[in-house]
Amino acid sequence: MESVIILALELIGTLAFAVSGAMTGLKKNMDIFGVCILGLTTAVGGGVIRDLILGNTPPATFQDPIYATVAVLTSLVLFLPRVRRLLMWDQALFDLVLFLMDTAGLGIFTVVGIRTAYAHVPQATVFLLVFVGVITGVGGGLLRDMMAGDTPYIFVKHIYASASLVGALLCGLLWHYAGEIPSMLLGGGAVILIRCLSAHFRWNLPRAHD
């Protein structure tokens, strides 16, 4: 049962980040190849970086094609003219969908990263768990923004990496007390809640010009 829940979370996270990446490609007026590559990179990029850090090679993305397949198919669906028109006719709707998908992917992949770290390093320190969780959560979006020619989202928009950091810390600390699934749900939920609150109340970290 736990394996089914984990797979479902990973696929939902993959789909959410693929939507985020593909929508960024659409916003940049990329062709179908560019949109698919951006969707794929956003969906699996964080996991690839995570696996390289943990020495899990080849990365899971290349061992099981289901994640790349979901990401590419999702990107292709978003490129369909009718779907594109539906998403892009209203900027507020576009921004909302992008925010929700990016937030869901961040929360899910942060805690999936921690689970992977535990699986490969049973005696992992909290520092390693949090580091790997945050890298898994923000890595794909970081690569997406760099490839799209934007300042990485994590450096300029609301509370982003900080939300991942809090969720990763919560998940890592609760792991041995609450169990795998509850700690992942609580940690991922914390990331999503902080992101939503920061967007609603316009919370931002101090900036250089403040």
Image (spheres, rainbow, N blue to C red):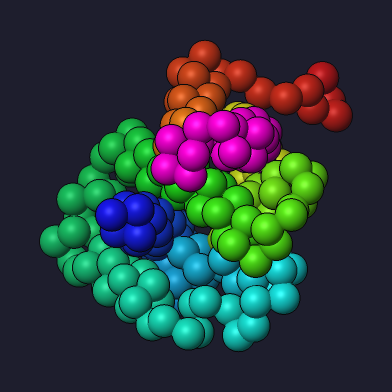
Tell me which corner region of the image, top left, top right, bottom left or bottom right, holds residue 175.
Answer: top right
What residue is rendered at 74% in x and 54% in y?
A: 123
Seen from this angle, which residue lies furthest right?
Answer: 208
Seen from this angle, which residue lies furthest left?
Answer: 82
Q: Nearer the viewer, residue 131 or 198?
A: 131
What residue is rendered at 18% in x and 59% in y?
A: 83
Q: Is residue 23 left or right of residue 61?
A: left
Decide if residue 191 is in sight here.
no
Q: Quadrant of the N terminus?
A: bottom left
Membership of 185 in magenta stretch: no
User: Magenta residues: mostly which secondary structure?
Assistant: helix
| Residue 7: x %, y % from top left | 35, 61
Tell me which corner region of the image, top left, top right, bottom left or bottom right, holds residue 15.
Answer: bottom left
Q: Is residue 96 left or right of residue 142?
A: left
Establish if 113 lies above or below 155: below
Decide if residue 169 is in sight here.
yes
Q: Is residue 192 left or right of residue 152?
A: left
Numbered-mark total = 0
What residue is rendered at 38% in x and 82% in y?
A: 65
Seen from this angle, which residue lies furthest top?
Answer: 201
| Residue 119: x %, y % from top left | 59, 62
Establish if 55 lies above or below 17: below
Q: Nearer the viewer, residue 207 or 159?
A: 159
Q: Is residue 127 left or right of residue 62?
A: right
| Residue 28: x %, y % from top left | 46, 61
Question: What span is colored magenta in the figure?
Answer: 161-184
| Residue 181: x %, y % from top left | 42, 43
Q: Nearer the viewer, residue 200 or 44?
A: 44
What residue is rendered at 22% in x and 68% in y?
A: 77
